[in-house]
Structures are given as structure tokens and as C-alpha cells.
């Protein structure tokens, strides 16, 4: 197995289903590895990392199971935290890539995002320009940590499906509504992109690669919390005290949608 010498950053592709996340993943990887569907799918998050190891199924308790090469895309969602797929794609030498299920996918378990999002260093949210930045997307993004928001970009995918006269208006509206919530807001036409990515002027991918480099420069790799020491053997003669258990915040139980923060009126400001 090939190893890299440093802890890689972890970049997550987020958004509602059929927003272009898997298309973007395949473009970044330089090959078709993430299944692209136009309807909701029953798939766990796909975790792409540099190397040549066999695929792994990561269970909810973080144990790992080896998978056959052709089984990575047919793993059951229940009980699966992620499917880890090794690849020699050049971009994975810089960061790991999480292709997450759509946030509005009815087949997605309520806590699917909660399991991996604490490990994410950089977020790329994809929203279709034809229905850009819906209320459901804004509500979910508002609940994300401010630190992650400052290390993120918003991509308006399928910008080529919007008329030339409407593109500027849509981009200005989204930049105004997401003020201070994304470091970059960019339009892209993913299906128009061709490798090499940095030369895809018409698609907007060259600007995406520049923005991604900026985000990588300002991000710190995720560090797993230190392992807790083994608990000492309990004195059986001592009284048993029930520990206080607090439930972590879940995406599915965020409660009422928080009021949107005040937006700036400078629609031309690049976030």
C-alpha cells in the first residue's frame, strides 16, 4: 500500500441529492468512481483516500471490514458509517474526499452526516443554479459550525442551464443571502468540464481549483481526539451511580429553523 507522509485534509462534498456532488467528485478524481444518479440513492458516504488498498466498510462503531473490489458501491446503508475507497488519483495526495449522500435524500439515515461532519476540514456545497440555495439548504448550513463555514465554498452547479441574462442576477442573490457563510461562491457547469481541470475556463472549474487551493492553505488537518485511558476496575462494594448522558446534536433534531442572520446588501462582494 502507498502511504503519504502527512495527515491529509478532509474535503466533503455536500448538498441535496442530484446537485452535482458525484459529478464533481469524478472530475476531481479524474475518473468515474462515484455513482451519478438523478434520483435519491441508498448509499453510505464514499470516502476516497490515496493508496491502493482494498475497499473498506467502516461500521458505526469504527471497526472496519474488507470488501471485494466490485462491492464498494453495493454496501448496505444500515450500520455503515462510510465506505473507504483507495485510489491513486493525484488530487488525493493533497486531501481525502468525502462524497456525502444528499441532505434531502429520503433514504439517508438521520445521523449519516453527523457521524462524519466533525472530521471534515473543508466543505464544498453544491446547489443547482436553476433552484439555487433553497430554504432547506440554508437551514441546514446555518447549523454548521462557523469555523467550517469559513473554510467552505458554495458552487452553483448547472449554471449553463440558466439564461445568460439571469446568471448575474442569480449569483448576486445567492451571494447576498449567504454573506459571511462561505469563503467562495462560484458558478460552474460541471458537465462542460474536461481534463485537465485547471484549463476548464468555460466550465468555471479553473476558478474552483484556485478556490480549493486557497481553502487548503487556510485549513488544518483533522486530528482525532486522544484515546481515553482504560477505566479502572470498579469497586463492587461502592454504590453504582448512573452517569449523566447527553445526546449529541443531530441534523435531524435541530428543532426550529434559526432566524437568518442579517445579510449584507453588497451583492457584488465575493464571499
Image (tube, rainbow, N blue to C red):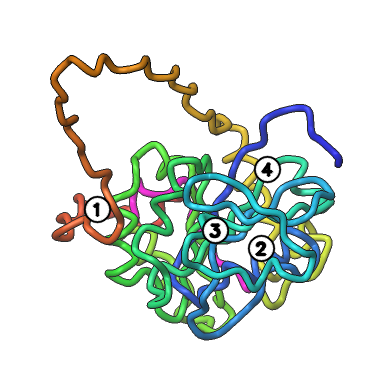
254 vs 56, left or right, is left
Q: Of the two numbered discs 2 and 1 on the same chain, state the one appearing first in sequence.
A: 2
| Mark 3 → mark 1, Cα distance in angstroms | 25 Å
Q: Which residue is drawn at the image coordinates 51% and 74% (left, top)?
A: 19
CA gap, disc 2 to disc 4?
12 Å
SS type, badge 4: strand
Between label 2 and label 1, give the one nearer the viewer.
2
Tell me if residue 224 comes above or below residue 156 in the rendering: above
Callout 3: SS: strand
* Residue occupying image coordinates x 36% and y 58%: 111
The answer to whether marks 3 and 2 mark residues whose Cβ atoms lie closer than 8 Å is yes
Q: Which residue is mark 1?
A: 263
What x and y, as percent, mark residue 78? Answer: 47, 66
Magenta extent: 178-189
Residue for point 69% across, 66% down: 72
Task: Give me the disc on residue 95.
Answer: 4
Say which residue label 3 marks. 13
| Magenta-colored stretch includes residue 194 | no
Label located before the other in sequence (3 or 2): 3
Calculate the distance from the C-alpha at mark 3 to the C-alpha at mark 2: 8 Å
How far, Cα to Cα, is label 2 from label 1?
A: 31 Å
Label at residue 25 = 2
Q: Comparing marks 3 and 1, which lies closer to the viewer? A: 3
Task: Provide the secondary structure element on which disc 1 rests.
Answer: loop
Q: How many residues crowd mark 4 within 10 Å: few (<14), some (14–19), many (20+)? A: many
Label 1 neighbour load within 10 Å: few <14, some 14-19, many 20+:
some
Amino acid at each position: 500500500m502507498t502511504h503519504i507522509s502527512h495527515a491529509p485534509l478532509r474535503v466533503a462534498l455536500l448538498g441535496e441529492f442530484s446537485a452535482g456532488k458525484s459529478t464533481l467528485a469524478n472530475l476531481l478524481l479524474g475518473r468515474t468512481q462515484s455513482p451519478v444518479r438523478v434520483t435519491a440513492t441508498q448509499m453510505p458516504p464514499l470516502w476516497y483516500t490515496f493508496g491502493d488498498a482494498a475497499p473498506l466498510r467502516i461500521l458505526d462503531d469504527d471497526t472496519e471490514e474488507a470488501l471485494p473490489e466490485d462491492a464498494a458501491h453495493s454496501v448496505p446503508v444500515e450500520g455503515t458509517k462510510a465506505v473507504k475507497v483507495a485510489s491513486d488519483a493525484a488530487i488525493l495526495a493533497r486531501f481525502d474526499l468525502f462524497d456525502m449522500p444528499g441532505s434531502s435524500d429520503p433514504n439517508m439515515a438521520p445521523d449519516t452526516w453527523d457521524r462524519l461532519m466533525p472530521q471534515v476540514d473543508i466543505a464544498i456545497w453544491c446547489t443547482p443554479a436553476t433552484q439555487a440555495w433553497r430554504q432547506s439548504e440554508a437551514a441546514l448550513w446555518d447549523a454548521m459550525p462557523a469555523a467550517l463555514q469559513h473554510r467552505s465554498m458554495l458552487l452553483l452547479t448547472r449554471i449553463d442551464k440558466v439564461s445568460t441574462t439571469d446568471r448575474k442576477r442569480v449569483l448576486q442573490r445567492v451571494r447576498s443571502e449567504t454573506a459571511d457563510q462561505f469563503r467562495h461562491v462560484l458558478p460552474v457547469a460541471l458537465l462542460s468540464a474536461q481534463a485537465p481541470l485547471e484549463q476548464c475556463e468555460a466550465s468555471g472549474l479553473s476558478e474552483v481549483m484556485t478556490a480549493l487551493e486557497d481553502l487548503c492553505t487556510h485549513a488544518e488537518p483533522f486530528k482525532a481526539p486522544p484515546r481515553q485511558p482504560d477505566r479502572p476496575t470498579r469497586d463492587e462494594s461502592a454504590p453504582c451511580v448512573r452517569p449523566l448522558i447527553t445526546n449529541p446534536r443531530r441534523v435531524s433534531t435541530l428543532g426550529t429553523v434559526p432566524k437568518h442572520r442579517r445579510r449584507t446588501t453588497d451583492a457584488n462582494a465575493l464571499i
